[in-house]
Structures are given as structure tokens and as C-alpha cells.
Amino acid sequence: MISHRMADVLRVLESGEGPAPVADVIAMAAGALGVDGMAVSLVTDDDLAELLWCSDGTTRHFEDLQLTLGEGPGPDAVRTGAMVWVPDLAGVRPARWPALAMEAPDLMTRAVFCFPLGIGAIRVGVLTAVRRTPGPMSAQQTDDALVLADALTVACLGSGAEPPGAAAPALVPQALQRAVVHQATGMVSVQLAVSLPQALLRLRAHAYSSGRSITDVSKDVVDRRLRLGHSLNGADPSTEVERDGSP
């Protein structure tokens, strides 16, 4: 049985009576689940998680870090279609997510809970909930999260990944938030004559080596403030780029 607080969240999502500000919907859902932040991502054709909406800066930073590193609970949930819980991020074995384990001590995010969105073999996306303090979800919070994930799955499948009715303004931004990463990947692919997966790896390598998010690096590529070099032979990627303001 779901809690009264989650029942209110579902009522807002399913109601056609007046729009609900996205901040209100997120705050309601986060409160019901006892977490500090939430994000919903959709699975793309290349099995990446495209950020649909995100509640706060801490959660966005963690989502960007996972995309930059190519590993973490979110990517695992997308790949396997199974729930991935990390009640204490600092306690994760380094062998599981080596790069993320190195970053974990400096993160504000301390606990992460990922719930896949999908029906059977159909994978739609992932619901991610984060906490700034370690600890598991309660049984009630888990039940609420599963019901919310089901509701989001139905909403996304019901209209081509765009929730119907009044819920649409609360869930769907004007553009997917990682469109710039896809655009930069395409540009690097053309510039270096490499495949799209290889181009994405080069973006990730430069972002990680420079200590920046892949989103910020991609913006520089798209704005032609950064052009990746042809050579990537194991040296520090930051030595193999040219800052170029020319077209």
C-alpha cells in the first residue's frame, strides 16, 4: 500500500485540472520518498540516459558525473533494467565503479537509489533519488518509489515519452537537457572521422582529465571554443586539444 503523501503525488501527475509547477511536484515526491533530490532520465537508442528533468544542483552534478565517467548506479540500472541501491556511496567497493569510487569522498551525494522505468523487455528510463546522508530507504518509501516509477513508465509510454495532460508541463522541458552532449558528439565524430561511441569516449576523457562536466565540455565544443585533437594514445587528453575560436 502506498503512503498518503505518494497518493497525493500521483493525483497531481494524473490530474487534468490545472498545471502543477515542476518544483512542487518534485518537492512532493522527494518528501514522500525521504530524499533530497530526484531526476528522471530516458534511455536513448545508444543506451545512454538522457536527462529529462532534475530537481537540484546536487542531483544534477551527480548525474553529470555518471555521464562523464560512463559508470555508476544510473548506467547500471539502464543496462540491466534492475533496481540499483547504494545506501552509502562511500562504502562501495572500488572494483565496482573505479572512477566513481575515487570521486565519492568529495561528493555531497551520499546515498543513491535507482529505479528502472520499463515494462518487461521495454526499457524507458530510470528514476534516480539521492540523499545527502547515508542510509537505506524504508519499506514504505521503497513501495512508494516503485509505484512512482510505474506511473512515470506508463506516462512516458502513453505518449512517446511525453506525459499526457497537465502533467506534461511538470515533466517535459522545452528540450532534453543533454542535447548539447549529443550535438558535440556528432561534431567530434565528423571532425576526427571516428564513430559516435569513440567521439563520446574522447569527450568523456577530456572532461575527466580537465575536472569539468561533460556538459560544460560539450558546450565549448558546440560553441567552437574547444576542438579535440586527433591523437589519443594514452597521454593526458588535456595535452591533445586545441582551444580554437575559428570556425
Image (cartoon, grey):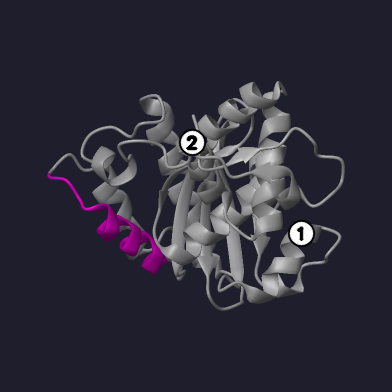
Residue ID at (81%, 39%): 232
Q: Using the image as rendered, state which of residue 120 and residue 39 is in the foreground.
A: 39
Q: Amino acid at mark 1?
A: Ala
**Residue 189, position as x, y percentages in the image:** 65, 25
- Seen in the picture, residue 185 relative to 244 is either above or below; the reply is above
**Label number found at residue 244:** none
Q: Main secondary structure of the magenta part?
A: helix
**Residue 76, position as x, y percentages in the image:** 70, 47
Q: Is residue 241 magenta?
A: no
Q: Is residue 20 magenta?
A: yes
Q: Is 40 situated left or right of 111 in this image?
A: left
Say which element carries label 1.
Answer: helix
Name the residue tied to disc 1: 99
Q: Is 122 situated left or right of 58 in this image?
A: right
Give the residues drawn in magenta, as a range. Answer: 18-32
Judged from this view, the residue extending furthest toward the front is 246
Q: Amino acid at mark 2?
A: Val
Name the residue tied to disc 2: 222
